[in-house]
Amino acid sequence: MRADRILGRAIAALLLLTLVGSVGVSPVHAAKKPWEKFHFGDLPDLKIPDYERHELANGLTVYLLEDHTWPLIDGRVLVRTGSAFEPAAQVGLASVVGDVLRTGGTEKTPADELDAELERMGAYIESNIGDTSGSVQFSFLKQDIDRGLNLLAEVLRTPAFDQDKIDVTLTGLRASVARRNDDLNGIVFREMQRAVWGKDHPYARNVEYSTIDAIDRDSIVDFYKYFFVPDNMSIAIWGDFDPATMLSAIEAHFGDWPAGNPTIPDLPNEPLETPRRRVLVANKDDVTQARIHAGQLGMRADDPDYYAMSVANRVLGGGFGDRLFNEVRTNRGLAYNVGSTAGVGFETPGVFQAYVGTKSSTAEEALGVMLDTVEKMREEPVSERELRDAKDAILNSNVFNYVSSSQILNRKISLEYLGYPEDFLETYNEKIRAVDANDVLDVMKRRIHPDRFAIVAVGKTEEWDGDLSGFGPVEELDISIPEPEGPEFPDPTDETVEAGRGVLAAAQTAHGGSALVHMSSAERKDTVGLSVNGMDLSIRSHAKVIYPDRAYTAVTLPFGEIVQCVNGDSGWAKTPQGTQSVSGDDLTEMRNQIIRDPLYILGHFDAFPVQLLPGEEIQEKAADVVLVWVNEDDEDWLKLYFDPETHLLLGTQAKGTNPMTQAVGIQDTYVSDLRDVDGVKVPFASTVMHDGEKLMEIETTLFSVNPKIDETIFEQPSS
């Protein structure tokens, strides 16, 4: 029995006893409930702390709040910038600038020295850029105020944008692209933004490998120089200081910074997509739940309907015990997670949406109940109790936004940045209290239009209880991640094809000739040294292969063994969590891995399209280069590098996936220590580089040519 049902029954029994026990009992003699014995006063009015606002001659706005509670100096710099203003071909540029502004060090203080000094001071300076603004947060002890402000000024005025740190950030972005389909909720949220705003809208664009590849240091510096100027920034400082002294210090560090007079366009708050009922469905085979969102464009918080919509959402799905929770989860048992968002944003209009997570077999049913619940909010006023509870919950939670003076100051400067009324914070509680049941009904009728909702659903569609076509025209949603573009190769000619085959024929002879051609199976054991974020891991691998389409590989990791097997047209994988079948693109990749083996290609190169490319250097050695199309339809290519004199293999290059980050990039493999194994020349040492960074060192401890392999190992275990 589920815990929530046990709790529900216990509460029902308690209510029943309360009702039975109250029969015939005079209210005068009825005992007060425990919570009725407590008296809570009205919420206090918001008190705005006394702060000073100044503007320097160069346009820098300065806010100062004196607070001697702790011997600390804290603050935030706000910059009018954001990813909304980056070029469509360079999505991700703003976030890279925001990250490397700090991590890349300054012209006077290199990155590692800056890290060490801040750590010694017990201080921090952190920077970031989001969709609609950039910020730099800082904190240091009062005793370090001079050095702290020096370092802050260096970060803001003379960032070094060290190339190594840029590369680290770009690698992290590539990893985030590779992992973006791992989380079901993340997929639906992302695709809901695209459905409502339009896929090419700045608020809905995706970072892709191609947009990352378009980001270079020059574009980073240009973006920084345009937006990071004093007349496009404000700085708020609070803490243990004298305001007059602090203003003088700010003037000394930033007063001679020339104004930039940038032209900053308005935020792109108009959608590209016309609201209409759409049902966007994406199949994801590796999940057992369905996640469904339905909604539309919302509003900014300075919209007059903001207060009524906040209350309406709290009744509908904004908290424990709301209508969606009660109807979809408690009464119907259809959801493990259900709710709604008001669709209110401070910088931009938000996206109003109702959402549900349910088991695959109830996807259509859960969506129907969720939409019906939304529709009922548009048909009749909410009850007085719902209204009271919703407003109380909003007002009580709002208290925690103003625990400290610094919180209030932060909100005040953010609202000024966005152009909100000066008394927005002070009048919030009053306007929430003024919302009545008719206001809630009115805002739901005027502003929420279920017949124009975009519906996004993701899950294992073959297990759903319907195809969702009853809710509107269904569109297949492509959530695949475009791979990075590989290098461009010249078109093959008769001459380059013939020359390529000549190089491979010479290499085949050098690596064993007939012995290589007749190698039908192999067994190998390897020790792999993997470099991950500065840590070295040792992994053991044991593989058995029957060419061209069967392979069994067992990898021993610190947390257990992983087995991956391809058996012709089928495949499977086994982890400590169990065994599952492999199909589709994953199975194709596993099969391609077998025939991508350079030794197999050398023994069977007549089966592949090949061509000679211009010579290159590999590890400071001149090399003959042959391009091999392992699978031309999938653009699966492999470059083979050979010593022009010995015709022995020097290395390879191909697109590959980083096993730790899942980022796709260019992998270079350098081979050495070639040994004779039953007439076949086999490399016993390899170094693998991923996008120029060392990924792993491989040492082969066993290699057997044409061993006898028990073919039952390729059969998938029952569990």
Image (spheres, grey):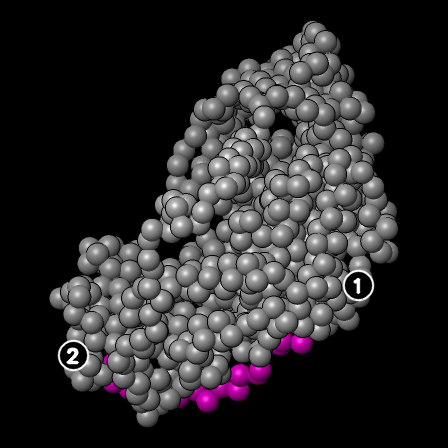
Q: Is residue 270 left or right of residue 26?
A: right
The answer to whether residue 70 of the structure is visible from this angle is yes
Identify whether 713 is placed above or below 599.
above
Q: Quadrant of residue 429?
A: bottom left
User: Where, by quadrant of the figure, is residue 374 drawn?
Assistant: bottom right
Across and down, in percent, residue 186 comes to 60, 50
**From what the image shows, is residue 290 above or below residue 132?**
above
Residue 626 position in % (x across, y down)? 71, 41
- Looking at numbered disc 1 in the image, what kind of residue is underneath it? Asp
List the residue tagged with mark 2: 242
The residue where tag 1 is placed is: 451
Q: In the image, which residues are magenta?
A: 249-271
- Give whichever of 49, 699 is nearer the camera: 49
Residue closest to the eye, 136 or 704: 136
Tell me residue 110's x, y (percent): 31, 61
In space, the residues marked 1 and 2 are separated at their CA atoms by: 58 Å
